[in-house]
Amino acid sequence: MDGEQRKSDDFREIAESLYKENYKHVYKVVFFAVHEKSSADDLVQEAFYKAFKNIDQLSDGKKFKAWVTAIAINLCRNHMKVRKNKELPLEHLGEHTPDESAEKQFMQNLVRSEIEGIFKELNYEEKEIILLKYHFGFTSKEIAEYYKISMENVNVKLFRAKNKFKEKHQRQSGKGA
């Protein structure tokens, strides 16, 4: 019994350490997707619960962050399907502070609405891969682990998504010129 207790205590310490190291990152990803504190809290808790419950399926402990984030993203997808809302929210991008000038706020709102319009034209995977890379700071390797594809494939998908975004932006800018 003493050996089992020690194993249990060791696991608890490791789990607490992994939780503390990764909580903020996972919460940021989840909150960005669902934009509701209570839902984000529940989904993050469920993601860590599932990760620790199935920890024996993780072959490389160094990949825990990518693994628990993938679990969280899948939970967010399921949550969004239930809500019938598959668009990724962009409201908080470019938010202003109260001390900014009205002109600066207007310009930020204009740019944000242009970006949102273009972003809505991308498919869900293109939106997701761009956000994972450029908003959440995932490496190509982490994205590859999440999608279970090669890094080269990730880079191709990123390249295509960026080009599609750029082309749509140039077309939209050309209309106004």
Image (tube, grey):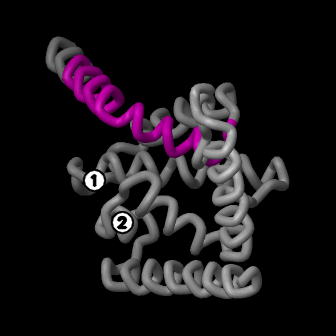
Q: Residue at x 45, y 40 (%)?
A: 26
Q: Is residue 144 above or below residue 15?
A: below
Horizontal and vertical percent position of residue 176: 75, 80
Report whether 94 appears left or right of 147.
Answer: right
Amino acid at circle 1: Lys
Residue 73: where, in percent of width, then height?
55, 52
Residue picked out by circle 2: 145
The residue sitting at 47% across, 82% down in the picture is: 157
Boundaries of the magenta span: 9-35
Please state, as top left, top right, bottom left or bottom right, where the C terminus lies in the image. Answer: bottom right
Instruction: Residue lying at the far right in this picture: please name it.
Output: 84
Q: Which mark is residue 83?
A: none
For residue 63, which numbered disc appears in the image? 1
Is 36 located above or below residue 89 in the figure? above
- Quarter of the image with the N terminus is top left
Q: Could you say whether the residue bearing mark 2 is in a helix, strand or loop? A: helix
Q: As shown in the figure, which amino acid type bears the numbered disc 2?
A: Glu
Residue 12 as seen in the image, left or right of residue 164: left
